[in-house]
Amino acid sequence: MKRLLLAATSLIALCIPATAQDTEVRVMPDTLVWKDNPAFPKGVQIATLVGDPAKAGDVVVLRIKFPANFQMPPHTHPYSEVVTIISGAVGTSHGDKFEKKGDLLKPGSLWVYPAKHGHYAWTGSEEGILQVQFIGPGGVDYINPADDPRK
């Protein structure tokens, strides 16, 4: 647990100076531009708040909107990620097989998954919005290739 907290703190600490060096950034929720992303299942929308997810070394902050009654299949990322629930309730667990293990987490909850760590998520009867922070480049690889909407 201490290693996980240290990793989260370190990633956040790295993000703040990198973002603040060039320009001030303010993001207002009502100005977000939500877009579909072919790498995510239908119904998921993404808003990029900071950075360029395609650029190596860029600090990236995204918001991801999951619809109600949604299941994000098991997947990995090439980066470590810090995830915070902004609204709604979202369940998350790790592994290569989807199982609803654990409770739905409330807004303000935070977790960290290391790079290449299999995990998945789900929502209940309402949509959930997550904020995800990482160092680019972004990417998602599905454990089961049949789950990949790009194929």
Image: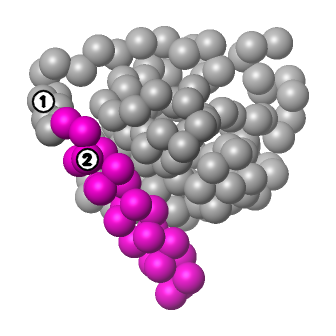
Residue 132 vs residue 73: left or right?
Answer: left
Report the predominant secondary structure element of the magenta stretch.
helix
- Whether residue 105 is in magenta: the answer is no
Count of residue discs: 2
Q: CA distance from mark 1 to mark 2?
A: 20 Å
Where is mark 2, residue-wise?
21
The residue drawn where x is 40% and y is 33% is 51
Q: Of the two numbered discs 1 and 2 on the same chain, state the one appearing first in sequence.
A: 2
Of residues 61 and 90, which is closer to you in this image? 61
Label 1 Cα neighbours within 10 Å, binned few <14 / some 14-19 / many ≥20: few
Residue at image position (61%, 23%) is 40
Q: Which residues are magenta?
A: 1-23
- Give the label, 1 or 2, closer to the camera: 2
Residue density around tag 2, few if under 14, some if 14–19, many if 20 or more, within 10 Å: few
Assign a secondary structure to mark 2. loop
Residue 78 located left or right of residue 37: right
Q: Position of residue 140 (x, y in %)?
A: 68, 34
Res. 22 visible in picture: yes
The picture places residue 71, in percent across and down from the top left corner, at 59, 35
Res 68 seen here: no
| Residue 4 % position (x, y) | 53, 76
Question: In the rendering, which numbered label is found on residue 28?
Answer: 1
